[in-house]
Image (cartoon, rainbow, N blue to C red):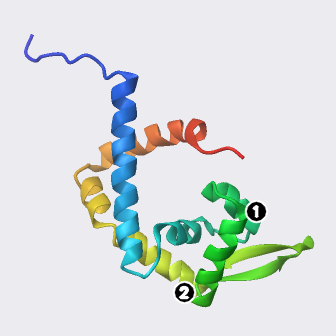
Amino acid sequence: MTGTAFPPPTKAQLLELVAALGTAQWQDFAAAAARHGLTSVQAKLLAQLKGPVPMRGLATLLVCDASNVTGIVDRLEARGLVRREPDPGDRRVKNVVATDEGRETIRRVRAEMQATHSALDTLDEEERNTLYGLLERLRPGLEHRG
């Protein structure tokens, strides 16, 4: 036998590692957001806007009360990063949409996450593909369900 076999990691060890990586990624995201004058929650809301999202839907995505979303959206709207528009199917519902400036701002925030980019740069293409596949398998069971 040429090498030492290590026992497989326990679920507790995996949970600890996932939590540590999530925390580090969130801190990197928050620091990049702050460089653009955004709180981490404002940037997270902006990152959720792939298309029009109802205010109540944002509260679910952000795991907070709808009244909190109003203030966050007010501040982003004042900066020209989002706009509210009536839902075409129900004009009582207000959707939040990222403006071009908002989409560009969140793109820059993500691009400036240097610690995260540096960590991912240590992986070769095969390792990145493997990691991506594993994370995609875990994602459905871990994402918040409303």
Amino acid type, residue under disc 2 in the picture:
Glu
Q: CA distance from mark 1 to mark 2?
A: 23 Å
Residue 60 appears at what percent x and percent y? 69, 55
Residue at screen point 37% across, 51% down: 23
Amino acid type, residue under disc 1 in the picture:
Arg
Relative horizontal placement of residue 95, taking residue 64 as reference (left or right): right
Q: Residue furthest left?
A: 2
Q: Residues within 10 Å of mark 2 (few under 14, many from 20)?
A: few
> Exactly how many numbered labels are in the figure?
2
Q: Secondary structure at mark 1?
A: helix
As drawn, the label of residue 101 is 2
Q: Secondary structure at mark 2?
A: helix
Which quadrant is the N terminus positioned in?
A: top left
| Quarter of the image where one finds residue 45 | bottom right
Residue at screen point 52% across, 66% down: 41
Residue identifier under label 1: 56
